[in-house]
Image: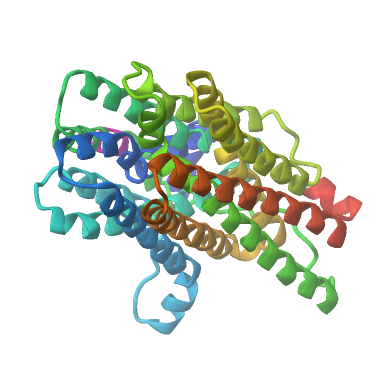
């Protein structure tokens, strides 16, 4: 009892903004570095001759496959603990700490000159990043709900963008200084360690009570429950389309830019621009009221990302790539923020598991992106043609996702009471 009171008072001392910032740094480490540092370092690895484009596609897929497995483990975690009942339960914040520690070690491990080991390291890093994402999201959003400060969740989702921007700027400097990719991986491992140390004390406050988000009444009846299950399935499908829609650009943006603008001094700035767009979009989402139908916002976010890809395809120029990078980043984590709020609306009592389900569907979308690029590159007469076809498919997938949300708005309209509560 004393331990519970101490933990709760520690959390109260931290306050909602401190919780949101801790979540942002956690996601910056696991997502911005653990997952996406590969993108700005890929041109360096290609230059060093340690990898080629087809191998890079499969290496990226290994990471996304790990992300999928990690998300599935998060989804079925309650069942696993019931199945192996002798095991003590593990707090969400403890999973976050374990995932962050793994991210530091696995990122640093990529500096080792053992290419045969790299797929396993990227796979494991994907698992770790999924655990950190799901449990950071669930834990922080629950704590923010206790303070009636759910809007600060947008601050937390600025973390990946900050990590992307910082890693991109660092990689740009490394290219200018002619450093090797191995050195880059080591530096990013040290940066991940610093971020982990900064948030470690906050995630020790695991015992605080969680206030569930408002939701549909449990007495609403079987028809409402069935509609809720159908909505969850549609939401998961639409979220998976977002994973496929953005991943081609997010993985190959520096390579695509180099192919279209050889010799440009601005080549390494498009990825940091994407990260800055992510930060801006996440912070802007904190200014948006969550009392309306978030599916309208999700449809708009998908349309913006489709437009961003279209700009790069139609205008493969400095201005086109800069505008496309910024527009692609703006809705990136806003999509996650709004989708996770939808999960809390539909399934407040088991939000973490369903967040894992959405993350798994996102992972499925991501896994299919890089192999598609590898296939189209092999069958195209030029790199430009292969990348263009891939980006056109990605943009079309995002538009399909936007239409799916609009269909859900008509098929499953929010009642006035639900809208006010959400």
Residue 386 visible in the picture: yes
- Decide whether residue 90 is among the magenta residues: no
Q: Where is residue 75 in the image (x, y as percent from the top left)?
A: 50, 67
Q: Look at the image and name its color scheme.
A: rainbow
Q: In this view, does 180 lie above or below 415?
A: above
Residue 282, by quadrant, is top right
**The N terminus, quarter of image:** bottom left
Residue at image coords 29%, 50%: 56
Dominant SS in magenta: helix
Residue at image coords 82%, 71%: 224
Q: Where is residue 199 in the image (x, y as percent from the top left)?
A: 36, 37
Of residues 293 and 349, the one nearer the viewer is 293
Range shown magenta: 192-197
Residue at image coords 33%, 52%: 57
Q: Is residue 247 above or below residue 288?
A: below
In the displayed structure, does residue 95 sit left or right of residue 51?
A: right
In the displayed structure, does residue 303 sit left or right of residue 167?
A: right
Q: Position of residue 298 (x, y in %)?
A: 70, 45
Residue 173, by quadrant, is top left
Tell which residue pokes out farthest to the left in this image: 113
Of residues 377 and 238, the one nearer the viewer is 377
Residue at image coords 55%, 35%: 313
Q: In this view, does 168 lie above or below 340?
A: above
In the displayed structure, does residue 211 sit left or right of residue 57?
A: right
Q: Where is residue 217 in the image (x, y as percent from the top left)?
A: 80, 65
């Amino acid at each position: 009892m004393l331990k519970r009171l101490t933990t709760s008072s520690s959390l109260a001392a931290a306050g909602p903004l401190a919780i949101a910032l801790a979540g942002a740094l956690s996601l910056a480490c696991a997502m911005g570095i653990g997952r996406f540092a590969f993108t700005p370092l890929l041109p360096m690895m290609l230059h060093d001759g340690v990898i080629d484009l087809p191998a890079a596609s499969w290496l990226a897929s290994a990471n996304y496959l790990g992300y999928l497995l990690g998300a599935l483990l998060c989804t079925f975690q309650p069942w696993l603990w019931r199945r192996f009942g002798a095991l003590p339960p593990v707090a969400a914040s403890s999973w976050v700490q374990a995932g962050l520690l793994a991210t530091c070690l696995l990122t640093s491990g990529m500096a080792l000159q053992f290419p045969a080991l790299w797929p396993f390291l990227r796979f494991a890093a994907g698992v770790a990043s999924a655990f950190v994402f799901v449990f950071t999201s669930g834990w922080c959003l629950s704590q923010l709900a206790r303070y009636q400060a759910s809007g600060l969740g947008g601050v937390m989702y600025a973390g990946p963008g900050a990590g992307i921007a910082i890693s991109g700027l660092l990689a740009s400097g490394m290219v200018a200084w002619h450093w090797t990719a191995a050195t880059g991986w080591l530096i990013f491992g040290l940066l991940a360690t610093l971020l982990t140390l900064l948030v470690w004390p906050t995630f020790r406050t695991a015992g605080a009570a969680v206030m569930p988000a408002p939701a549909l009444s449990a007495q609403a009846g079987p028809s409402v429950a069935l509609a809720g299950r159908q909505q969850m399935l549609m939401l998961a499908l639409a979220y998976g389309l977002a994973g496929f829609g953005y991943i081609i650009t997010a993985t190959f943006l520096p390579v695509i830019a180099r192919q279209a603008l050889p010799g440009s001094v601005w080549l390494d700035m498009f990825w940091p621009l994407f990260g800055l767009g992510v930060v801006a979009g996440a912070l802007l989402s904190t200014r948006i009221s969550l009392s309306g139908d978030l599916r309208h916002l999700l449809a708009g976010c998908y349309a913006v990302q489709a437009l961003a890809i279209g700009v790069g395809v139609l205008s493969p120029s400095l201005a086109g790539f800069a505008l496309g990078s910024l527009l692609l980043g703006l809705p990136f984590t806003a999509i996650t923020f709004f989708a996770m709020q939808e999960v809390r609306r539909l399934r407040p009592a088991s939000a973490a598991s369903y967040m894992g389900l959405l993350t798994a569907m996102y992972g499925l979308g991501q896994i299919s992106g890089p192999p598609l690029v590898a296939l189209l590159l092999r069958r195209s007469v030029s790199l430009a043609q292969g990348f263009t076809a891939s980006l056109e498919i990605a943009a079309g997938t995002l538009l399909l996702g936007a239409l799916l949300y609009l269909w859900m708005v008509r098929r499953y309209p929010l009642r006035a009471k639900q809208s006010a509560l959400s």
